[in-house]
Amino acid sequence: MSKAFREEELAKIHNALIKEGFFAGSWICLERPSIEFRKFYKDFLRKAKFGILNYLQKYRLKMEPWRMLKGASSAFILLAPYITPSSKALKSKLPYKISLYAYGKDYHRVLKKRAKKVLLSCNQDHFRIITDSTPFPERYFARQAGLGFIGKNGMLIHPHRGSYFFITVILFQKKLPNSYKKNAVGKPQDDINRYCKDCTRCIDACPTGALVGDGTLDINLCISTITIEDKLSQLSYPDQSKNHKWIFGCDVCQQVCPYNHEPVLSSWKEFDPALPFEQLLTNPTRFEESILNGTALKRAGLKKLQENIQKLYNT
Ligand code: B12
């Protein structure tokens, strides 16, 4: 097996993945994240109130990418849009709000299946595809790869296509030519000064006041944590929280972001609504847990969704 990629091979993989429906991608030589990032993350962990969840401690980001794939030396980082015309249309008809990334089939499987098919067709046989299910610092490397900037809401934002996308990372053992080495590109505060400037729409709109303003958030206040990750329902909405109807994740900090004025759409059928949402939300007790199998909502489970609906009436 060749130890280094040939330029034509890199272009072939890149083009084939974009043709598949990922909207942007970039190659990067893997290195340990900068000292500045490691310090930032340590600080974030120190300040975060893990409380009952212990969530971030459990999935603590790993600073050695090669622990994800032995001998990993390079990565291709991709952005995959998830809003489809059908999910966008359904959104306004539902009695409760579900984050736009969660209408379709389980995105982990969809993204991996699609990327794997393309890689095999490009004769690649040694790689690892990861997306949101390992402690790989995805936003850090995506930013480092030049795919976007970090906004006040903490999202990786593509300057022309916004932030409604998943990050997918493909790790390879093969080396990249030196010209692909990317030097550290400043820090989120520089992005915020340059791209967000005085805008505070996300901070003002967050229903629970979770956004700090420097790209970090109080994870115990984020509706995404409360509605999905807090399995034992031990967290509660703060008293001053604004009325909201989110029962799975939350998109408010993305909805109000000016960079999302025209979200990039996906043509993948797997991201179209995969459940009878209207019936499910108006009468959840009529359904069995198995209805969520293979969908993004499975992460919360039916019982949690019912509790979330209930919780909205008690706040
Ligand atoms: C834990 C987690 C959560 C937690 C905590 C999120 C948080 N902001 O910390 C909760 C459950 C709250 C959550 C919510 C959401 N999440 Co989430 N989550 C993750 C996960 C698994 C780990 C993230 C983590 O460790 N966060 C800790 C903080 C400190 O790090 P970070 O998120 O990587 O981002 C910071 C650093 O990278 C830093 N940084 C970047 N470059 C540099 C450089 C330097 C020098 C320095 C100092 C710092 C720095 O800036 C970022 C902002 O602070 C990742 C997948 C992964 N393995 O990375 C997905 C991920 C971040 N989530 C994602 C999504 C889509 C969401 C939601 C939009 C889902 C929803 N609609 O409800 C919300 C958004 C909330 C928000 N505004 O951030 C996407 C984000 C895509 C994007 N465009 O940015 C990811 C990447 C999953 C994926 N593969 O697509 N999530």
Image: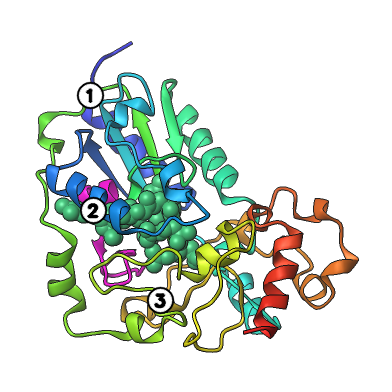
Question: Is label 2 in contact with label 3 (beta carbons under 8 Å)?
Answer: no
User: How far apart, in angstroms, are the residues tagged by discs 2 and 3?
Assistant: 23 Å
User: Looking at the picture, does residue 300 appear above or below residue 36?
Assistant: below
Amino acid identity at mark 1:
Lys
Who comes first in sequence, dot 1 or dot 2?
A: 2
Rendered image quadrant of residue 214 = bottom left
Amino acid identity at mark 3:
Cys
Residue occupying the far right of the picture:
286
Q: Nearer the viewer, residue 252 or 240?
A: 240
Residue occupying the far top of the picture:
1
The image quadrant where one finds ligand 1 is bottom left
Q: Which residues are magenta?
A: 140-163
Who comes first in sequence, dot 3 or dot 1?
A: 1
What mark, if any, has residue 290 been given in the picture? none
Q: Position of residue 288 (x, y in %)?
A: 86, 57
The secondary element bearing badge 3 is classed as: helix
Rendered image quadrant of residue 277 = bottom right
Q: Which residue is mark 2?
A: 43
The secondary element bearing badge 1 is classed as: loop
The secondary element bearing badge 2 is classed as: helix
> From where the camera sits, is residue 22 visible?
no
Mark 3 CB lies closer than 8 A to ligand 1: yes
Q: Position of residue 158 (x, y in %)?
A: 29, 64
Q: Nearer the viewer, residue 300 or 233?
A: 233
Q: Which residue is mark 1?
A: 175
Q: Residues within 10 Å of mark 3 (few under 14, many from 20)?
A: many
User: How far apart, in angstroms, are the residues tagged by discs 3 and 1?
Assistant: 38 Å
User: Residue drawn at (32%, 51%), measured in percent from left and top?
Assistant: 45
For the stretch drawn in magenta, what is the main secondary structure? loop
Q: Nearer the viewer, mark 3 or mark 1?
A: 3
Q: Residues within 10 Å of mark 1 (few under 14, many from 20)?
A: many
